[in-house]
Amino acid sequence: MTFMGRLRAYLFTGILVTAPIAITAYLAWLVVSFVDERVTKFLPKDYNPNTYLPFAIPGFGLVVIAVALILIGWFAAGLVGRLMVRLGESLVARTPIVSNVYSAVKQIFETVLKQRATTFRTVVLIEFPRKGLWRVGFLTGDTPGRAQGVHPTPLVNVFIPNTPNIATGFLVLVPRDELLVLELTPEEALKLIVSAGIAVPSPEQLAAREAPQPDRNSATAPSRSNK
């Protein structure tokens, strides 16, 4: 390799090492600054150290929010707190439109925070949007109601994220025997989707693990396809 070739290789290596760290630190700083600016201005001056210290404390707003959420959770876990939460939920349930939004948001947060069942923990491969084209998705649970009668094999719910915006996607009802469980972890699958297939685990990593074993008694642990 020539001298200029070595310099070019070192330059690309330096970019590869520093760019992810710099971008991550910058995004984290933006989030911290955004929260600090909007939280600290509501605090009394006597309780805001940024008003009398010669320097600002980064992340103080995040600490305030964390403490406030802990106190709210402690209060809601008590007898009086539970009664107030039930009263508030009963009032919301009687409000048109608002009740639907509240119930949907609450269910999503309960699923994510409590990690119920195996939601979004199983990565699968299905043929979508037509035969011969394959998409990576996440198993989210059993399909309820009359939908089970449209196919002889029980149907399951699979969420297929879009690239690169994984917050949007498709909900597909798939026969359980047409799923292929992948060895990917949810984090690796998300990286694969967001990067448009660039960020993939090494063959050695995949060879060192096995896909989840099928459980034919549960739709949340689908079997491999025979294809």
Image (spheres, rainbow, N blue to C red):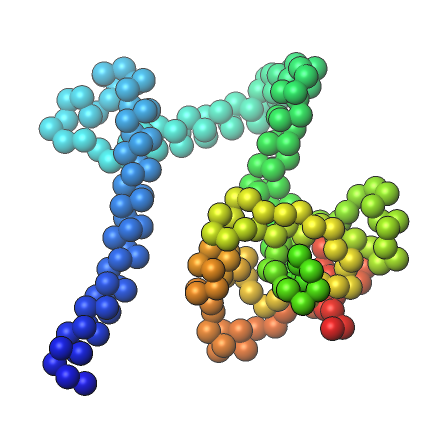
Q: Quadrant of residue 121?
A: bottom right
Q: Measured from the top left, where is residue 197 in percent x and y?
A: 48, 64
Q: Measured from the top left, where is residue 75 in percent x and y?
A: 52, 23
Q: Residue furthest bottom?
A: 1
Q: Measured from the top left, where is residue 116 in percent x and y?
A: 64, 45
Q: Quadrant of the C terminus?
A: bottom right
Q: Residue at x 31, y 32 (%)?
A: 34
> 209 or 202: nearer the eye?
202
> 224 or 91: nearer the eye?
224
Q: Residue at x 56, y 65 (%)?
A: 184
Q: From the viewer's perspective, is residue 210 above or below residue 150?
A: below
> 47 or 213: nearer the eye?
213
Q: Is residue 207 left or right of residue 154?
A: left
Q: Quadrant of the N terminus?
A: bottom left
Q: Is residue 215 left or right of residue 16?
A: right
Q: Is residue 187 visible?
A: no
Q: Measured from the top left, where is residue 57 in percent x and y?
A: 22, 33
